[in-house]
Image (cartoon, rainbow, N blue to C red):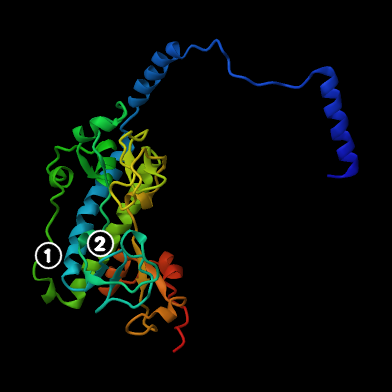
Amino acid sequence: MSLRNRKLWVSTMMLQGLTGSSRFYRSNPKVDLKKLRPMILKRIEDRAKDYPVKSMVPVAEDVLKARTLLIQGVSTLLQVYSVWACKHCPEVYIGEKGHLIRNCGGYKHRAKNQIHDWIKGTLNDIIVPVETFHLHKMFQNVIKHDQRFDFDRIPAVIELCLQAGVDPNNKLYSNNLNSDNLMPAISGADSLSPHELRLIGRGTLRAWETVRSGVQKLLLVYPSKVCKYCSEVHVGPSGHKALLCGVFKYESWRGSHFWKKAEVDDLVPPKVMWFRRPQDPHVLVDEGRDYYGHAPVVVDLCTKAGVIAPSKYFCMMKVQGIPAPV
């Protein structure tokens, strides 16, 4: 602040002190919250009349269709390509055997920079299950802690599509919505030709992008919350009051959630993993971790089937990057 501006500011403050022109803000003590409560409830009821938005119903239907194809495609490719999951942390890798990068945090994060203990991966290691409470209606009373067993828990994507207006009695979506019994994997996947595997991979990758883009559109219209300190998701205008923070993971905290706005990665986690490029060694080692790329596990699985990844992942995958020095 220049000397001239500083003198002007001091003079102004002195003048305000002499004339008493300073402002004081305080809450109005005459406001009666008991009288405002019916008005607030009436506004909530009127807001519920605007949902579901008819133009978003086709988007929700496309998300459920793509989700069915995604799970079927991943289940089929799992029969052909080896997927490894760490026994002590969420790390996943696709290859003949697991990598040797020392980034395992161990059980309950009690270790650091350890070698992974690999076991065979499953569908849940690739498509991370994210569940939430199934609401009877979008604008209902907040779920309290002693009511947590009165509501079913279903996949968050399905709950979002239900609130978006998908008919749960529709035969096309009945299995997807009720019991999550989706289309089974293609039998005899080992005998499929490379061309057939490429077609399955292309359809799986297209379904993956459709699910994520559709969920992103739905989140612009239908409010969803995620806990700031754990992975709990709630689809609705306000979070629940169940004291479950940390229950579904390994945290020791058991208390109220701290809600914030949910993003697409909270409902459809990309599960980013190490990506082996053609110029990388057959087994990724810890010394070259600064040179290796990353990719969402679904994208990497589809590229193993011969599909070219979308260009938006090239930077993450370091496709044009130099190999690690020998």
Q: Which label number is shown at residue 186? A: 1
Q: Mark 2 points at which residue?
A: 125
The quarter of the picture where the C terminus appears is: bottom left
The label number, if any, that marks residue 316 in the structure image: none
Above-or-below relation of 248 to 32:
below
Residue lying at 78% horizontally and 19% vertically, measured from the top left: 21
Answer few, some or many: residues within 10 Å of disc 2's Cα (few below 14, many 20 plus, some between 14 and 19).
Answer: some
Q: In which quarter of the image is the N terminus?
A: top right
Which residue is located at x 37 percent, y 33 percent? 238
Lower sequence index among marks 2 and 1: 2
- How packed mark 1 is, by other alpha carbons closer than 10 Å (few <14, some 14-19, many 20 or more), is some
Where residue 53 sits: x, y (%)?
33, 34
The answer, for residue 272, to whether it is visible in the render is: yes
Residue 250 place in picture, x, y as percent: 31, 53
Residue 321 left/right relative to 184: right
Mark-to-mark CA distance, 2 and 1: 19 Å
Amino acid type at circle 2 is Asp
